Image: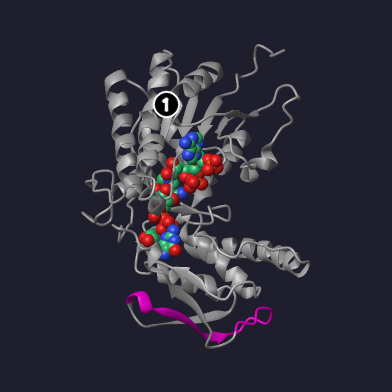
Amino acid sequence: MRMEHEEKKKVAFITGVTGQDGAYLSEFLLNKGYIVHGLKRRSSLFNTERIDHLYQDPHVENRNFILHYGDMTDSSNLIRLIQKIQPDEIYNLAAMSHVRVSFEIPEYTANADGTGTLRILEAVRLLGLEHKTRIYQASTSELYGKVQEVPQTETTPFYPRSPYGVAKLYAYWITVNYREAYGMFACNGILFNHESPIRGETFVTRKITRAVARIAMGLQDTLYLGNLDAERDWGHARDYVRMMWMILQAEAPEDWVIATGKTTRVRDLVRMAFAEIGVELEFEGQGENETGRVASASHPDYQVPIGQVVVRIDPKYFRPTEVDLLVGDASKAYEKLGWKPTCSLEEMVREMMASDLLLMQKDRHLNHGGYSTPNYYE
Ligand code: NDP
Ligand code: GDR
């Protein structure tokens, strides 16, 4: 029984709980004493690897981490869950979040990422929770798309360049509209790219660190990439989920840019990852014929032959329309909320490489034992 003087625990509902940010945010909120409810999709295989360490046996009473089946495309499911959970805070992180894939499944992306956000807002309104439940919307630097201004701030005009970006544009504005129309505490975090050792394997940072680790272990020869000249403002997911929470604790509902303020080319990230295994790369050629060759190799444990071509271009990774340059100015968040990133890109690449080297060591053992492990990811 709860004692009178005990403070009631806050209740959060996270959509996209099985994703990179969902996992970090769940940990963060649980450490803050929240009861965390998460929305997970039904899939034919387990999809909870990132949050398995938080799992609690459903037969145990007083759990503080509870998962529910659901989908952003199913209004009735979302209304029923929000009615049952009565959340103080909703973090809407669920999305088909891969920019290139959104060109292949544009309609689904619009439904899950765009209309899905409307479903959450409308559920809160229909249930009369608009003055109780605060809502965080996972907006993105992809809204800026074609470069209009550098660095990008809360007032930089949007010009999305993918079905994903356009779906997220709808989500951004419907969040603003519900805030203005119904007085809801609904906020957009315009987050620039953020990564970690549990980043999805098909995003470029993780694809690179994974492949470099496989090359170090002799499990793979070549890493195939698309546009090496794109520039991104990469931060660490752990820093960014902290900011999601801070946004919902602010005095007033507003929209915020979250970024490191530094931008790096994909090709330099590739160099940084190879440097972690003692390999210095030399890029040669141009466009689709560009290659990355081993110029020197100095790590005693990883023997990658000098002269070996370890990076090639595969045009299938080019996008019909690309976002060339992203660099954010998070001054507003620094000044008004006191947020600052704590992890540099160098530290993050080191952490991701260390984690992937460990994983690939396991794969190497499996391979030696006669089991096959996946070779590459799209
Ligand atoms: P992930 O791709 O790692 O995770 C996406 C999550 O959404 C997964 O849990 C996924 O489930 C779930 N999901 C996808 N479609 C549906 C659906 N139809 N119904 C229910 N759940 C669904 O993304 P991140 O964690 O990296 O990003 C979180 C959010 O932040 C996303 O909205 C993304 O667009 C946005 N964002 C991300 C940035 C980044 O750099 N990481 C930057 C700016 C914004 P499953 O595990 O089953 O696939
Ligand atoms: P992005 O991330 O599109 O910025 O979206 P991603 O890591 O996919 O691409 C970054 C840049 O790298 C270039 N690139 C490649 N990208 C991938 N995935 N695979 C490749 O082989 C490759 N080669 C070069 C891309 O062209 C691009 O320029 C991410 C997602 O998390 C979104 O959900 C989020 O909204 C934005 O970040 C901010």
To which quarter of the image does residue 136 belong?
top left
- Work out whether 272 lies above or below 112: below
The spot of residue 107 in percent (x, y) is 35, 40
The spot of residue 34 in percent (x, y) is 59, 29
- Residue 241 seen: no
What SS does tag 1 mark?
helix
Comparing 98 with 338, the one in front is: 98
| Left or right of 299 on screen, residue 157 | left
Task: Specify start and end residues of the magenta stretch as a single range.
Answer: 287-304
Comparing 173 with 40, the one in front is: 40
To which quarter of the image does residue 233 belong?
bottom left
Q: What colouring style does the render use?
A: one colour
Residue under pointer 1: 120
Is residue 36 part of the magenta span, yes or no?
no
The spot of residue 160 in percent (x, y) is 27, 48
Q: Residue at x 34, y 40 (%)?
A: 168
Comparing 131 with 314, the one in front is: 314
